[in-house]
Amino acid sequence: MFSGIIEKVGKVESIEGNILRIKSDEIARSVEISESVSVSGACLTVIDVEKRNGFFTVNVIPETYSRTNFRSLSKGSEVNLETALRVGGKFGGHMVQGHVDCIAKILSMEQNDDSWIVTFEKPEKISRYLVEKGFITIDGVSLTIANTDKSSFSIAVIPYTWDNTIISGYKVGYIINLEADMTAKYVENLLKYQPR
């Protein structure tokens, strides 16, 4: 379980089949083999750690590749990183599973004083969960939906988030990972099985 509060931005060192090696001194020092790390929104298991060199390695299975933008990663790509929540620790953001639902394209980006408005296409698969002022996880970042219409939704990005995540490197047309609010999914499922 994660909160969507990004701890560090890491860099992809190598991708070999289903093995992804990532450089981040801070994250490598704090994780152990078998722990979970959110990599741009996808919950992945650490299979090797090189604490002295600042690298950690995770498995990426075909299911993950099929739902994420990981096919476009290459050596040097930046990724958002968050370690799993600890019992008794602070909880910001919202409840994030690290189970990416789908990908979406960035439609527009505009600066608004000291913040940025980023607009994305609205994937039909999760459109019913996207509500104004509701939660959305984008590349692992917990964000609030500012506006939504039939075919798109937008977020407002504050300077801190812009400066401390990969969002500052976004461009129009870029493909991002999305995870809808899991609370909405549970409510929908419970209502589906209510007696009539």
Image (spheres, rainbow, N blue to C red):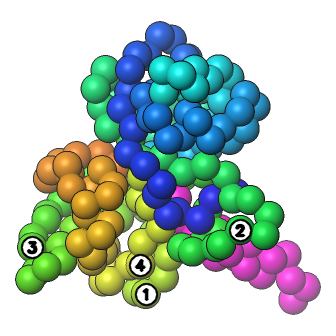
Frontmost of labels 1 and 3 is 3
The answer to whether marks 4 and 2 mark residues whose Cβ atoms lie closer than 8 Å is: no
Q: Measure the C-alpha gap from mark 1 to mark 3.
A: 20 Å
Which is nearer the N-term, disc 4 or disc 2? 2
* Secondary-structure class at tag 2: loop
**Circle 4 sits on which residue?**
144
Query: In screen coordinates, is 176 left or right of 64?
Result: left
Tell me, yes or no, if residue 100 can be seen here: no
* Secondary-structure class at tag 4: strand
Q: Measure the C-alpha gap from mark 4 to mark 2.
A: 22 Å
Label 1 sits on what residue type? Lys
Q: Measure the C-alpha gap from mark 1 to mark 2.
A: 25 Å
Frontmost of labels 1 and 2 is 2
The answer to whether marks 4 and 1 mark residues whose Cβ atoms lie closer than 8 Å is: yes
Q: Quadrant of residue 168?
A: bottom left
**Circle 3 sits on which residue?**
111
State which region is magenta: 179-196
Up-down relation of residue 54 to residue 5 (above or below): above
**Circle 2 sits on which residue?**
89
Which is nearer the N-term, disc 1 or disc 3? 3
Tell me, yes or no, whether the highlighted magenta stretch contains residue 29. no
Query: In screen coordinates, is 137 left or right of 163?
Result: right
Q: Quadrant of residue 88?
A: bottom right
Tell me, yes or no, if residue 182 can be seen here: yes
Which is nearer the N-term, disc 4 or disc 1? 1
Q: Measure the C-alpha gap from mark 4 to mark 1.
A: 6 Å
Q: Residues within 10 Å of mark 3 (few under 14, many from 20)?
A: few
Residue 7 in the image, given as x and y percentages of width and height = 48, 54
